[in-house]
Image: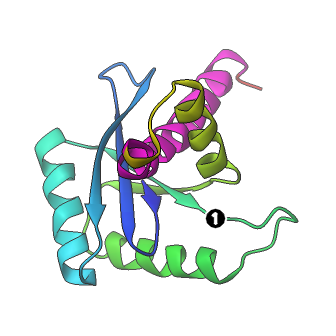
Amino acid sequence: MDFGSKVIGVAISDELTITAQPLTSIRRISLEKDLSSILEIVAGYQVEEVVVGLPINMNGTKGESARKAEAFIEKLQGRLSSKIIPWDERMTTMAAERVLLEGDVSRRKRRKVIDRVAAALILQGYLDSRSRKNENPL
């Protein structure tokens, strides 16, 4: 997930956990409704692990956005039996914007999909790191 102040971008992996695909965007309404929407997705797709982007500052420190994401993760963990993995999401929104620009996606369409594309990049980074660990079990 790409946790934002107005929208939560959601992505999902394939069954083999090799690739990530954008899934949906949840327009933030209230904490309770946001959590409910996520719980529906987790149950509907039988999700075992939830990766939540943690917006770490470029210098490695945690700012206000990271603290808000951590508070959200804590609330979500209280309602979810799936494992939650915070994941450093530095530069993912910028990378998502670049991907969409290169794909010649219109500005209007970019605004609608940027969060879920960023979520897919966050998830893909996590999946890639897992496959690297499995290749080099040191």
Q: Position of residue 91 (x, y in %)?
A: 70, 50
According to the image, label 1 marks what residue?
A: 55
**Residue in the picture at 13% in, 57% down:** 40
Mark 1 Cα within 10 Å, few/some/many (few <14, many 20+)?
A: many
**Residue in the picture at 64% in, 64% down:** 55
Residue nearest the observer in this picture, 100 or 56: 100
Q: Position of residue 59 (x, y in %)?
A: 88, 65
Residue nearest the observer in this picture, 107 or 123: 107
The quadrant of the rendering that contains the C terminus is: top right
Q: Position of residue 18 (x, y in %)?
A: 45, 20
**Residue in the picture at 62% in, 74% down:** 66
Q: Is residue 43 left or right of residue 91?
A: left
Please identify the quarter of the rendering in which residue 88 is found.
bottom right
Q: Is residue 111 left or right of residue 128?
A: left
Q: Is residue 78 above or below residue 12?
A: below
Res 116 seen here? no
Give the magenta part as a residue range.
109-136
Q: Is residue 119 left or right of residue 63?
A: left
Q: Position of residue 71 (x, y in %)?
A: 48, 81
Instruction: Determine if the magenta segment contains residue 38.
Output: no
Q: What type is the residue that disc 1 sits on?
A: Pro
Q: Is residue 25 above or below residue 63?
A: above
- Colouring scheme, one of rainbow, by chain, secondary structure, one colour: rainbow
